[in-house]
Structure formats: C-alpha cells, structure tokens
Image: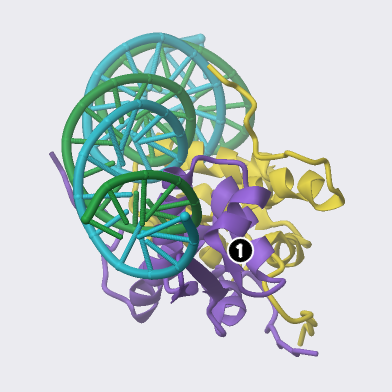
Chain colours: A yellow, B purple, C green, D cyan
Amino acid sequence: MAESIRLESSPERRSATQEAALELLTAVADPVRWAVLERLGDGTRCVCDLRAQVPVAANLLSYHLKVLRDAGLVTTARRGRWVDYTLAPDAQERLTAALPTVGAIRVEVAS
Amino acid sequence: MAESIRLESSPERRSATQEAALELLTAVADPVRWAVLERLGDGTRCVCDLRAQVPVAANLLSYHLKVLRDAGLVTTARRGRWVDYTLAPDAQERLTAALPTVGAIRVEVAS
DNA sequence: CTAACGTTTCGATCGTGGCTGAATCAATCA
DNA sequence: TGATTGATTCAGCCACGATCGAAACGTTAG
C-alpha cells in the first residue's frame, strides 16, 4: 500500500507545483500524444484528421485525447459529426513552466 | 504480437526527433527524477545529498540517476567515496527542444 | 589486513498505463 | 424512421517501468 510516499518530505512552495507539472509532462511523454500536440501546433484539427496522421485505433486515439483534455492542454468543439481539437492557448507556456527549473532564467518571445 | 506499431508509418524527418524527445520527456516525467533535476539546478550535488532531499531508498535513487545518465541529462564524477552529479550544460536547452513544437517560435535567453 | 561507508548492480515482484474489442452515444443522410 | 459515420466509453488483458531485498563494488578509516 504505502499510498502516499510522494516525496514531499517538507511542504515547500515548489512541491505544490510538482504534482501539476508531472501531470503535464506525463501527458506529453507519450508518442501518440506527442504527435497529436505537434500536429495541433499547426492549428485546429478534427479527430478524423488526427487519425490520418497518427495511425492508431480510433478508440485508442480517443483515450489519449482524453488525457490531453484532462491535462488542460487541448479544448474541443463539436462541428456536425466531427469533433475539433484545438491547442489550449497557454499550452506552450504551461509546458515549459512544467520543466524542472534546471538552470538559467527563461525568456519566452513569441513571433 | 505486433511489436512495432510505433506510429512511424512514414519516416518523416520529424519522426527521427520524436524518439529522442520522448526519451528526454519520459526521463523528466517522474517525481523522483523531476525532483533530482530541480535540485541539481542549484549546482553539483553528491548522491548522499540528493538522498536527503529526495526520500527514497539508495538503490532506487541510483536507478533513477541511471535513467538521467542514459538520457544525457546529468554527468558524474567520483570524489572519494562519494559520487557527484552535475546537470549537463545543455540540459535546459534539450528539454525545451524536446517539447512538441506547440505554437510560436521560442527564443531562449540565459541571464 | 578488516571493517565500515557510499554507491551501484542484480533478480524478482507488483502496479499502473497503454492497448484491444465491443458497446454506446451523437449527428447526419437515405 | 432506420442506417451510416464519427467519436467516446466500458471492461478486461498485458507488458513495462517503478520498487524492493540482497549482493557486489570502490574507497577510506581503523
């Protein structure tokens, strides 16, 4: 059992962040989800479109899309029979922020 | 057993990157390893020092350190009985580059 | 030399996340 | 209406990675 050895020996301010950061990183650290995000970087795509690029079963893709939804990295909108997936506007920002602060200050500049 | 449905239907130039990116991201997407990297962001630490911050068994910590080594995120140096771990100089750069290109161009500026 | 310490490696177990097949839902078309 | 398509949900299986106990290794201290 030992259900909560979650390495939070002392509740420092950063530990609160850790859990959320790991949800984001685990969401990205999967070949299917990584490919989906990469694809959505080009703009909104319906599931059928994503399926063409990411060759997995429909239900499996749906499973991975749910993980991305739960992580708040994508949003959905139904359009007729289809469901469009769009990258969350703050996806890039939240992902880079989820990386362990591993060195110098980061400055993000969007073109 | 369908051992290689690794979603590389067509060998595009990006697929080559994907594998390396996922190794980095899976390395970071773990509570122990995330905490270790965070700690190493402050500078070189010996294993015993890391153990104090990340409360896991010594052999388990060693296992996770090996994952980070294999990913090229950290380097080691023996100092007497102890082994010092140091963040790879390009760790930050490689990690941010491993994220799916999810939007605008990123410009990194180290302070 | 032996002993103790810090760290790594080995072998085996266990739990969780990814995968599958079938059922279900939501929307359009005949 | 029933049929078809796109997408999701459900239940169960299975492989892989995280974890554990014990042993082995390298180094320093007695």
Q: Amino acid at mark 1?
A: Leu
**Is residue B38 placed above or below A27 in the rendered structure?**
below
Q: Quadrant of the N terminus of chain B?
A: top left
Specify whether residue A1 is in view: yes
**Is residue A2 placed above or below A20 in the rendered structure?**
above
Q: Nearer the viewer, residue B66 or D7?
A: B66
Q: Position of residue A89 (x, y in %)?
A: 77, 62
Packing grade of label 1 (10 A; few <14, some 14-19, many >=20) is many
Query: In the rendered view, does A74 fall on the left or right side of B65?
Result: right
Q: Which residue is mark 1?
A: B37
Q: Position of residue A62 (x, y in %)?
A: 49, 38
Number of callouts in the render? Answer: 1
Going 70% across and 79% down the picture, which residue do you hit?
A: B104
- Residue A102 sits in quarter: bottom right
Going 80% across and 44% down the picture, which residue do you hit?
A: A16
Q: Nearer the viewer, residue A91 or B108?
A: B108
Q: Position of residue B7 (x, y in %)?
A: 31, 57
**Is residue A5 placed above or below A28 in the rendered structure?**
above
- Residue C3 sits in quarter: top left
Specify whether residue A51 is in view: no
Query: In the rendered view, does A27 fall on the left or right side of D19?
Result: right
Name the outermost residue toward the right.
A13
Q: Chain of mark 1?
A: B
Going 76% across and 66% down the picture, which residue do you hit?
A: A93
Name the outermost residue toward the left.
B1
Q: Disc 1 on helix, strand or loop?
A: helix
